[in-house]
Amino acid sequence: MSEYSVIGKPTTNVDGTAKVTGEAVYTFDMTLPNMLYGKLLRSPHPHARIISIDTSEAEKLPGVKAVITGKDTPGGKYGLWRRFRELSDQEVLATTKVRFIGDAVAAVAAISEKIAEEALDLINVEYEPLPAVFEPMEAIKDDAPLVHDDFANNINNTRHIEWGDVDEGFKKSDYVREDRYTYSSQHPAPMEVHSSVASYDKGSGRLTVWSSTQSPYFLQLGLTDALKMREGDIRVIKPHVGGGFGAKNSTMPDSVNAAVLSMKTGRPVKIVFNREEEFTATEHRTAMHLALKIGLKKDGTIMAKEAKIITDGGAYTGLGATTLYLAGTYLTFPYNIPSYRYDGVRTYTNKMWASSVRSFGATPAVYASETQMDRAAHDMGIDPIEIRRKNAMTTGYEAPGQYRLGSCGLLPCIDRVEKRIKEKWTDLSKDEGIGFTAFAYMCGGIFNWIDTPYAFSGAMVKINVDGTVDLFTQASDIGQGTNTVSVMICAEELGIGIEDIRLHPADTATTLTDLGAWASRETLMNGNAVKAAAGEAKKVLIEVARMKLGENIVYDLEVKDKRIYLALRPERGFSYYDIVKDAIKRNDGEPIIGIGHYTPHRKGMVSPAFAFGSMGVRVKVDRETGQVEVKDIITAHDCGQTINPLGARGQVEGSIQLGLGWGLCEDLPTDNGMILNPSFVDYKLIRSRDMPQIELHDVPTYDPEGPYGAKESAEGTVAPTSPAVANAIYNVIGVEFNSNVLRPEKVLKAIRKKEEKEEEAMNG
Amino acid sequence: MKRELKFVVNGDSYDIWVEPNTLLVQVLRDELGLKGTKRSCDSGSCCACTVILNGKVVKSCSMLALQANGKEVLTIEGLANGAELHPIQQAFIDNWAFQCGFCTSGQIMAAKALLDENANPTREEIQMAMDGHLCRCTGYNMITEAIQDAAKRLQGQKLQEAAQ
């Protein structure tokens, strides 16, 4: 369909061979000569004052090279919300008190992991346990213990969003409905645990850190603040990363402690978390309570919406303050809402802190708003697909002061899924039902809480004399396929093949700043930077070709299929390789270099573009056991111009897998702040046999802000999955669920309760 | 007290001394430097560490290295024929059957053992065989499709060999 040579063509992963042969190196796999192994001692108390720490016995253990506590660190506090210093609330090691079970209080470096672990047992910490608080509703009470002394009522952050006249909107509504929801916490659980290797050069005073991170730049800044060093003296390199899903945005105790231990010992230090630490002491989903009110006209038109959210933030901030804002934002998608009022509160509690998880802020919000939408439709006797069509956002829609849509393919997505549902699912049994949802997702955030003076994405292209290209970008491929997308965009722009490009990714010393892999930002933001960089280099080539042709300046030149030629007379042109040689000669021997940047401007508060879609799921409910089987899924998405259909499909498949997990089997129950299921034995993930087949429809649009019109495809389908399942279950058994994790026991209980009620009613 | 371990890994003979409580995965990764085999769960429940021992899949994190004494181990590093990828590896690439790649070595080794036993498995048989292999990225369907594709390629290869 397209005139493109590379864009839109199914392209295999540029890291493919390395990953299928076991040669891809992850931080987890790294060793350096003379390297030591670090381990962290963690608090067994949810909230306690540290009275004393005695490390003398641990220090005596043969093979131990350093033992550190909070007083041995440079003392910097750090966090992602750097613009608001009071929210930089993490310490390298807790100095005065511990705030959750798992807060790190001491660290050891030894010649083996085993010795380091033994040394932890020899550290004696005296604690004075303090009253703790675990629930957000409790945390805001006046008599609740304070997790951080400076934050009254444990309020970490509040957000308010408002447009239109909400009170008037409800007055004019024919139908108003209020619902309360809770959405539980879940763990990103990437397959590679948090891993870091730090190497401090005593001579230069410079530090190099290799880490399993979603953002080398965020980590560089976290280390800068924690260690009180110059940013430029810290180099962060991201090797291959074994998944992130939100867990690896924040700077965590692995990297900062490896760094301090390396500074103390003068040797490289590696810290790798074990799976239990991963579950109990790394960032997970923000659990929240939501109160949601919607007002509609008789015909189904939304008039007003009001929402209140309180989130269980845990002990520190992470990206949780952004989650609070995004939850309030996603409650408005993907519908035309003339008036909206949102108030959100994020609380500190004595638990592992909650931050971002794939589909960042969207999952709980979309669960609430998409199930409420169905309920309203049922009450009003309107078809649930029709009510979504009636209120669907379209291109050009604007939420005042918040966001404006440069493209929106929602309506054709709704139409496509509806059509396929009608064609395909004609044989529902009485135990089967269909659930429908619509969704939108951002293409990166217009947020600068990290307080960077740099462009949000940067890229550099160097064309060598033989026509090969070195592409430098800091974009983080954590599995989602960004490396492939970067190379494809560069190849398209320069009219060459992906085999001509060598990618140098994610090293803060050699690449221009990129904010990393979160909120589905890399395709649009990094893609724009790569396209701009390649475009700069292309300009040089075109100039040289134009001079050689001696043609009128109004004639356009094209660069395609390794040729540079007159657009209107393709036979008149030159080989790309010849022009590159000429250009370098003309340029006094300098290789051709192009630099490109992208920062969103005049795009509101949220994101420069949004992807859209709709989803239909077919489920079967076993009324005897409560087991929910997801039989089939049909989804359509508008991700603008798809860059790589293979990768985009992979993202959708993986998103739905996580969405099913959030809805059906994953959560993190706690008891007095202790996570009860910190292993893959007890934390149930979706497995191969649980996955239905997915019918994916691409509904292309062109977004003026995206590279070649591209938008995200990485996260959009996560959030609509669990409400689609809940809506389908409602259509089978007629029970509304106001919380997620619809395990068999919960569904069965609801079925029984309903049957009892019906029986009572019958018996009068 | 260390004990002698003689075994064959990817066709090469090794004679090394290990502590009796050393796990097979530790020897593969830390002694032999074969880091393609991953560890992820610490509880024998993710299968990222899967290797083939005398033709059968094993979790190398859940057995002692000494249990491999006198036996043959195949890891991900031993699958390709020099620079030529094994058809399963190529099928994983062509079907985008991995994303982060951390579970991929285990997935591919399990697929190899499955296809050695059952040259033409159904979707359900593949899902059953691969069910313990946790993957957080792919949603599994593209892995299943890659294995179906690999089965076809291997059958084609066999037919070609028979014809020659």
Image (tube, coloured by chain):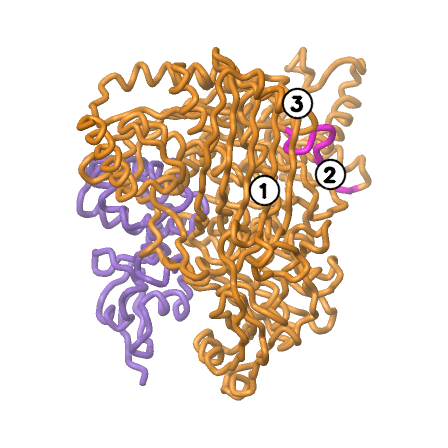
Chain colours: A orange, B purple
- Mark 1 and mark 3 residues within 8 Å of each other at the beta carbon: no
Q: What amino acid type is highlighted by mark number 2?
A: Ile
- Mark 2 and mark 1 residues within 8 Å of each other at the beta carbon: no
Which chain is mark 1 on?
Answer: A
Q: Quadrant of residue A79?
A: bottom right
Q: N-terminal of the two: label 2 or label 1?
A: 1
Which residue in the structure is indicated by mark 1?
A324
Label drawn at residue A595 = 2
> Closest to the observer: B79 or A247?
A247
Q: How many marks?
A: 3
- Mark 2 and mark 3 residues within 8 Å of each other at the beta carbon: no
Which chain is mark 2 on?
Answer: A
Left or right of residue A105, residue B51 in this image: left
Q: What amino acid type is highlighted by mark number 1?
A: Leu
Q: Quadrant of residue A543?
A: top right
Is A241 placed above or below B138 here?
below
> Closest to the observer: A185 or A261?
A185
Q: Is residue A595 part of the magenta span, yes or no?
A: yes
Point out the image quarter for the C terminus of chain A: top left
What x and y, as percent, mark residue A241?
A: 50, 51
Q: Main secondary structure of the magenta part?
A: loop
Residue under the point 62% across and 34% down: A527
What x and y, as percent, mark residue A511?
A: 68, 48
Q: What amino acid type is highlighted by mark number 3?
A: Gly
Q: Is residue A619 part of the magenta span, yes or no?
A: no
Mark closer to the observer (2, 1): 1
> Closest to the observer: B133 or B28?
B133
